[in-house]
């Protein structure tokens, strides 16, 4: 059975990226709350590629248990063999899924932002389409 738990190291990686990356400034300027999780699952996608990470919006009915707007989960077994830079890129990718629409009344609406292509333009521009290798992908 899959087990997920809060991972403070992933939070640290994310907070550094949010502070430093211009492409993530919209998160810094927002009140959005994100919980960072690690999973022990060796999840694969429909094409048998190892899933590195995923970003999910927390459903309103689950907010009592997870007091956040999003969870970002990295699949620690699927990260084995990746460099620190690649793991940072996984986190960067997942953070780009955090969609924030500011409203006129100061409220913010959240949704999972979709990829431009198979990945985000920000990631492809910097790292190319094959940054994680052919057998791996970030969801
Ligand atoms: Zn993705």
Image (spheres, grey):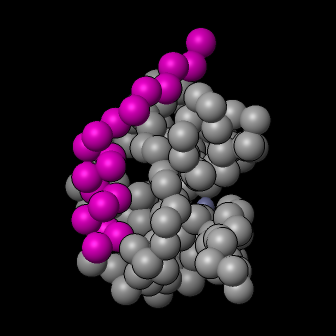
Q: Main secondary structure of the magenta part?
A: helix
Q: Quadrant of ligand 1?
A: bottom right
User: Residue 90, percent across and down?
Assistant: 43, 58
Q: Residue drawn at (65%, 71%), measured in percent from left and top?
A: 108
User: Residue 112, percent across and down?
Assistant: 68, 62
Magenta residues span 1-19
Q: Is residue 137 visible?
A: no
Pick the quarter of the image with the N terminus: top right
User: Residue 36, percent across and down?
Assistant: 43, 44
User: Residue 93, percent across and down?
Assistant: 49, 65
User: On the picture, is 44 further left or further right than 34?
Assistant: right
115 and 135: which is toward the camera: 115
Q: Residue drawn at (71%, 86%), measured in percent from left and top?
A: 104
Answer whether residue 10 is magenta in the image: yes
Q: Is residue 117 visible?
A: yes
- Label count reads 0
Depicted 132 relative to depicted 2: above or below: below
115 and 97: which is toward the camera: 97
């Amino acid at each position: 059975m899959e087990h997920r738990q809060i991972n403070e190291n992933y939070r640290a990686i994310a907070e550094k990226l949010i502070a430093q990356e211009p492409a993530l400034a919209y998160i810094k300027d927002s009140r959005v709350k994100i919980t960072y999780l690690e999973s022990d699952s060796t999840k694969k996608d429909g094409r048998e590629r190892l899933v590195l990470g995923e970003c999910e919006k927390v459903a309103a009915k689950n907010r009592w248990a997870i007091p956040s707007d999003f969870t970002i989960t990295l699949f620690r077994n699927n990260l084995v063999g990746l460099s620190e830079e690649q793991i940072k890129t996984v986190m960067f990718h997942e953070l780009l899924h955090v969609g924030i629409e500011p409203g006129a009344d100061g409220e913010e609406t959240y949704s999972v932002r979709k990829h431009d292509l198979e990945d985000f333009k920000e990631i492809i521009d910097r790292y190319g389409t094959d940054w994680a290798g052919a057998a791996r992908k970030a969801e």
